[in-house]
Image (cartoon, helix red, strand yellow):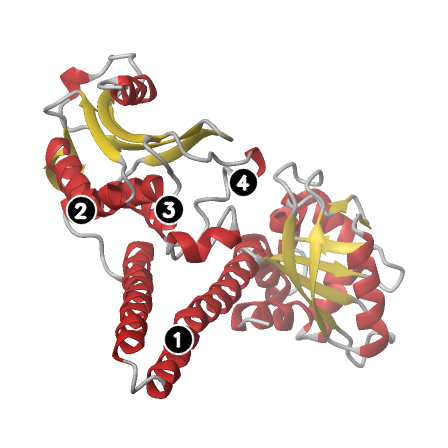
Amino acid sequence: MSPLVALVVGLVLGGVVAATVILRFPRDLERSGSDAAAVGPPEAAFARRLLDLMDPAVVLVDVDDAVLLANPSARALGIVRGSRLLVPELLSLVQTVRNGGSRRADVRLPGDLAGSGPRLMGVHGVRLHSGTLPLPGPVALVLQDVTEARRTEAVRRDFVANVGHELKTPVGALTLLAEAIEQAADDPEAVQRFAGRIACEADRLARLVRELIDLSRLQGGEPLPELVPVQVDDVIAEAVDRTRTAAKAKGLQIAVGGQAGLVVRGVESQLVTAVTNLLANAVAYSEGENRIAVAARARSGFAEIAVTDSGVGIPRKDRQRVFERFYRVDQSRASSTGGTGLGLAIVKHVASNHGGTVTVWSEEGLGSTFTLRIPLVISDTQGDSTTTDAVAHDALKEGS
């Protein structure tokens, strides 16, 4: 229980007279609100006023499970109607507290109670009694919304587990390759082959560490640099240059098209990283003599940068999850593509930090289009209704 909650509960039942007033006139207090708090000693009025102002929900339940009082936060949750507590799990917790003393538990509230979706509440139940009140006495419930806190804890646990798993693969490979080199010391050709594999695994490990650092910075580990005007053409040119070698190694061509001269407000290095990651993803999942297109277009006050490939496509069930950290549509392709599962997560955070979004269109066997939307600096380019998807597909057709 927080110090503020402890203070309020202590004030509510800290004095025999104050407690008697609150328990004797609960219905009057509920009907007339804070004005009724003036009845009785100053401690009772002060306690009631504090309860009304508290952000945590507080409910006081009598020995017959009737609600003696509930502050506005509790009633806003929809867990109290009149003098009844509506959530069976809370009533069960009240009984447990009444029989065994103080308890803490997480209780999930249905989404239809207050109309704001299901929420997870951290509940602290305390049995209250004094020498003038009959045992077992009333039970106080203090509820705080822990939905986001529990979600963050789960994400953190998953993140640590995923990082450990991803690090284990290259580290294990490096260990095995070092042993293989030691055993093949008399075979220069084998040593050279194993050394090449070590270099690949070391590069993969370095890329994972680098992307973890980038992701940490983007998620608030460091303050966002000042946003300045950035030429979209320069961003695309740099990203294409970084990806061209990998594309050429797979026999892929990168076509650039769309509207020139667009300017956005942002951090150029982050935008280059985002577009590079989209292009690298397109290269990784494209085969044969396919083309990859990147195109920019102004639309509704945003610069849309679309990267289109003719690769394997993404199943419908996976399309919204591809931006999650370490998520891969096909785990069996992870080693062949050399990806870390962080590239699209980085793109998502870059877009968010710039006040934009990233979306995906895809069909299995037809390919995918990832569209990065960043607010424009120049307003007179707004209103162009041509989508970047269409421009990217036109670029794909050029030279076919």
| Residue assigned mark 2 | 242
| Residue assigned mark 1 | 171
The local secondary structure at tag 3 comes to: helix
The local secondary structure at tag 4 comes to: helix
Question: Residue at left 33%, top 82%?
Answer: 181
Contact (Cβ within 8 Å) of mark 1 with mark 4: no
What amino acid is found at the position of numbered circle 3 in the picture?
Leu
Separation of marks 2 and 1 at Cα, in angstroms: 26 Å
What amino acid is found at the position of numbered circle 1 in the picture?
Val
Separation of marks 3 and 1 at Cα, in angstroms: 24 Å
* Mark 3: few/some/many CA within 10 Å (<14, 14-19, 20+): many
Q: Position of residue 358 (x, y in %)?
A: 36, 36
Count of marks placed on residues: 4
From where the camera sits, is residue 266 visible? no
| Residue assigned mark 4 | 318
- Mark 4 or mark 3: which comes first in sequence? 4
Q: Position of residue 27 (x, y in %)?
A: 78, 49
Separation of marks 1 and 4 at Cα, in angstroms: 29 Å
- The answer to whether 197 appears left or right of 272 in the picture is right
